[in-house]
Amino acid sequence: MDYLYEYAQNYSGLTKESFDLAKKHLSEVSFKANDILCDLQTEPRYGYFIKSGIIRAYTVNEKGKEFTKSLFSAFQFAGPLSALIEGRKSELIYETLTDCEVIQGDYIELRKLFDENIDLMRFSHKMLQFYFIGLENKVIDLGALTATERYLNLKERFSNIENLIPQYQIASILGITPIQLSRIRKEIYSK
């Protein structure tokens, strides 16, 4: 768990004493590819800090079509944040796309500590700011970038994504159809 402490300390100045308080509610866990961390309409308890691997958040419409909302990778937090904050059922499914090593945090217990400890509250606040900025950037990208530009950005962020997850999931992340993705890839690789 040292890597999580170093990350938190560098990011928000979290003290070792404060981290040790939180550590009681953290555990290192391994998941296999395609494990469901949080299912649709379940009440979540845990959030995850990813050491390695990729997790996706997605939903399924009435016709069974999947819509991927986000991908999370190493040194990111993943989990049904809105549901955890509001104490309600998750509107998204969180699934491992690859084998993952994570630190699982009991959000209910950690939240009590956030209310009592200024260091942990500051860390939580910084993480929420980081998450908000990421969402805002995603909205801007969806409106301002072409599908090709979004694809190239995704490949930059996940260099071997095409070897990790199916094409239909990549298309879903980009907000396009698999046929559109195939055309984009053909155009890029023909240059």
Image (spheres, rainbow, N blue to C red):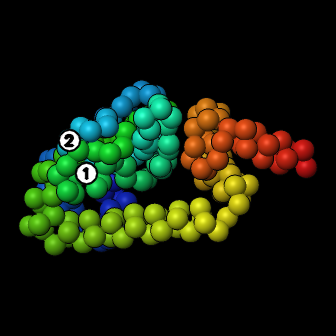
Q: Position of residue 32 (x, y in %)?
A: 42, 27
Given residues 169 and 104, the one toward you in this image is 169
Label 2 element class: loop
Question: Which quarter of the figure has residue 145?
Answer: bottom right
* Callout 2 amino acid: Glu
Given residues 62 and 72, the one toward you in this image is 62
Q: Position of residue 140 (x, y in %)?
A: 56, 68
Q: How far apart are marks 1 and 2 (CA)?
A: 7 Å
- Mark 1 neighbour class, 10 Å CA radius: few under 14, some 14 to 19, many 20 or more: some
Residue at left offset 42%, top offset 35% = 62
Tell me if I can see residue 73 in this picture: no
* Callout 1 amino acid: Ala
Q: Position of residue 87 (x, y in %)?
A: 17, 52
Determine the residue located farthest toward the right in the rendered image: 191
Label 1 element class: helix
Q: In this view, does 98 lie above or below 50?
A: above
Given residues 130 and 19, the one toward you in this image is 130
Q: In this view, does 112 lie above or below 183?
A: below
Residue at left offset 73%, top offset 55% = 148
Given residues 121 and 96, the one toward you in this image is 96
Q: Position of residue 15 (x, y in %)?
A: 23, 67
Tell me if I can see residue 64 in this picture: yes
Residue at left offset 31%, top offset 35% = 39
The answer to whether mark 1 and mark 2 are in CB contact below 8 A is: yes
Residue 128 relative to residue 57: left or right: left
Q: Which of marks 1 and 2 is nearer the N terminus?
A: 2
Q: Residue 83 carries which label?
A: 1
Q: Name the residue under label 2.
A: 43
Residue 44 relative to residue 170: left or right: left
Q: In this view, does 96 lie above or below 149?
A: above
